[in-house]
Amino acid sequence: MKRIAIPLIFLAFALTACNLPAGTATPTEVVITEFPTPSPTEESIAIPLPAGLPVVDAPALIFVDFQDAAHGWGLASTGTGSIVRSEDGGATWLDVTPSRLTEVGYATHLSILDVNTVWALIPNADFVTGTLYRTADGGATWTSNPVPFGGADVQFLDPGVGRALADRGAGAGSNAVEMYQTSDGGLTWVSVYQNDPTQPGSSDSLPLSGIKNGMTFVDANTGWVTGTRPVDGEIYLFFTHDGGATWAMQGLSLPDGYEYNQYMPFAPLFFGQEGFLPVTISFPGGNLEQVFFVTHDGGATWSADPENASQVITYPGRFAFADALNGYAWNGGGLMYFTTDGAQNWAGMAVTLDLTDTLAQLDFVDAYTGWALTGQDETGVSRLFHTEDGGVSWTQLTP
């Protein structure tokens, strides 16, 4: 599974949650037959784009995801917004927005399988339904179809098999969600789970309580949902082994004394059987730290030692892993953390770029090549920077 760079957003820990029960269980193997587990595929080769695509000058980028040192996807809010693609490492961005799509912005969600295959979810005004666009030729052509969700976290495992975790409303520390699955590339979707107690057939195996913030599947059966609620000593990590039909909390071991802290995990990242679970720790008094739980068995077990200073990020920020060994964590200040041994040890290095309070996203494709994107300033301008030496020095690409 390709590396994913996740922006770390510090949500409030002091949420008022509904007190629904949530049991802890040991993962057990459940096999479903609807969707086969996709087999590994070779890295895709970029399909050449047609000549004459318009260039977006000084794009106000709000999201980027690079597949290699040259090819990247992005969203830009310039004008009415656009879906953009770069073939030169982010120096130039081409407008590949579907012709029927008239508005792109922060509500747009991209699910990127590779340099050629991408889905774009555009919510309708009600945010309950939406339109899903798909390209298999790098944005040269698109198809679209209506979908029964608008705001959702969408993930595809291959060109056919996908999942969507739809937001069905949040309030008072609770968050209703609905899980959909597809086997035909997003043309049709089937609801397999929902936890809204006002709806028939609802279930609380993935509790209504807690604000959900991410979803990751490693195959057609096994996936996780993360979130947070103000419960001391709890890491909100729920897993499924039947494609999302049922869920259980996966318990994680913490050192003595850490039961008085609150935790915010984010959707895990996987590179085959190796994976990372980012967790922000909130200490009494307001201090924050960051650790990465590690798995070597596809998520069956996770381990981390927040008492070990070499595993702790003391200034939490954005993070990105290029592969199962090399990762970066940075709050935009003068010190960037990096690991070369799969988050077992983190070290700090001085950087030449200061993005304090402005860093929005971090993305790396190997141990040396990466990008840093800022949020938009008061004039609507964002800046994209590029590094080829592992983050020590940076070159501004946009605007």
Image (cartoon, helix red, strand yellow):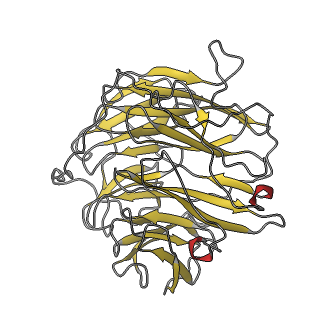
Residue at 46% from the left image edge and 27% from the top image edge: 242
- Is residue 70 found left or right of 352 in the rendered image? left
Quick one: 48 or 308, which is closer to the camera? 308
Compared with 72, 164 (above or below) is above
Compared with 249, 94 (above or below) is below
- Is residue 8 found left or right of 188 in the rendered image? right
Residue at 30% from the left image edge and 31% from the top image edge: 160
Residue 32, position as x, y percentages in the image: 39, 23
Residue 11, position as x, y percentages in the image: 69, 54
Quick one: 342 or 253, which is closer to the camera? 253
Residue 79, position as x, y percentages in the image: 46, 53
Residue extending farthest to the top is 200
Q: State which quadrant residue 22 falls in.
A: top right
Residue at 50% from the left image edge and 83% from the top image edge: 353
Quick one: 166 or 289, which is closer to the camera? 289
Residue 348, position as x, y percentages in the image: 53, 82
Q: State which quadrant residue 97 falls in.
A: top left
